[in-house]
Amino acid sequence: MHMSDNKKNPPTNAGNAALTIDEARNAILNLVSTTSETESVALLDSVDRICAEDIFARQQIPRFRNSAMDGYAIRFDDLSASTSLNVVGESLAGHPFTGTMTAGTAISITTGAKIPDDADTIVIMENTTVSNGTLTVMQPPSRHQHVRNPGDDIAVNAKIVSRLQRLNPSDCGLIAAQGIGTVSVTRLPRVGVFSTGDELCTSDDTPGNGQIYDSNRVSITALLKRCGINPDDLGIVRDDPSSLQQLLNDHRNYDFILSSGGVSVGQADYVKDVIGQNGELVFWKVAMKPGKPMVTAKLDNGALYFGLPGNPVSSLVTCVQFVIPALQAFSGEQYTPPLTVEATCTSELKKEKGRFEFQRGWLSANQQQLSVATTGLQDSHVLSSVSQANCFICLPQFSSGAAIGETVTVLPFDSLPGL
């Protein structure tokens, strides 16, 4: 395991007080240290992975002078004598002109093709006419126009990717342009996911009296997969402390273990007690809605345990707000607060003071103005409120909601990894 043992103890709510969202996230991130393990992967498989080393340019880009346009390569000074030039050859991408340009000549050239050493300017095709091999320049270019010079984009030894940078598609293209086919990336975390509850069954089963299909495990797994992490499915654990204890005994090779359910204060909510016997409880309440009950612990074997709430919206929100930042920190990515925007509320939003709320909404733009409306019933069991949404409406802890026409802070799903 690669969890830090030498950081300051994070704030806990051992006194039964709920942490704020930022306090909870900081407490979690303080428990995580970047893995030192790396692996080499094919460049085509490296997108969204965390690069484990600085990468420097081996060669300049462009490698040689080439044309930015389809047209003709000329010597600019020849235009001072005549606007008519003899076309004596062509330079195509991958098939350069190999002859010598004499005074008063031009070479047909395509975009990206190598410019002959004797030429210094490109005149675009639209500004010329050609008849019987004679090029007439109708609109003279400026000197050096449409010429891409070596190193204009990247110089030799320039850093093109930084260590612990998440690789995006353009980064992969920059690396490929250097002739590099494999990259070193940090190891992904090993993650196990399970659900708790006698009321749950899988899609392969027929629900018994009082049972429901388990959706949390599927939603959480899907969230993680969208972040490039493939967790192991540990199934469903029944409402029996010994069953949870057996699972922990059998799965000691994970960096993170995630469960949903069993973390509130009901008779069958035993997760906190069992986890406390197997490690150090960090906190178990967050002043947010949905998602107040959330067990966070560091197990004796070094793994981090997240006991997410059982209600489906609560488990999704807590996973996005706390678990995914922790998983990304493990692989070396620095936490960056997601982008928020301001929008005009077109629905009345009701809220009780005391907890920060993530209400589900639909953000839209009309005549360059952003507006947001609720997706309906906001109870934490209503998963459709997320399915029909594209954002969270962020209502501060001590607000009492928002009226139609008020400006509210909105967190678009597009700025949240996983959603």
Image: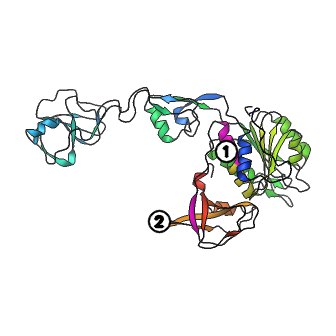
Q: Residue at x 85, y 35 (%)?
A: 249
Say which element carries label 1. Answer: helix
How packed mark 1 is, by other alpha carbons closer than 10 Å (few <14, some 14-19, many 20 or more), is: many
The answer to whether residue 291 shows anywhere in this view is yes
Q: Position of residue 363 (x, y in %)?
A: 57, 63
Colour option used: rainbow
Q: Amino acid at mark 1?
A: Pro
Q: Position of residue 401 (x, y in %)?
A: 69, 68
Left or right? Give the position of 368 relative to 116: right
* Residues drawn in magenta: 322-345
Q: Which residue is mark 2?
A: 368
Q: Amino acid at mark 2?
A: Gln
* Residue 325 badge: 1
Asked if residue 299 lies in the magenta stretch, the reply is: no
State the residue in front, 161 or 176: 161
Asked if residue 324 lies in the magenta stretch, the reply is: yes
The answer to whether residue 390 shows anywhere in this view is no
Left or right? Give the position of 366 relative to 391: left
Above or below 288: residue 77: above
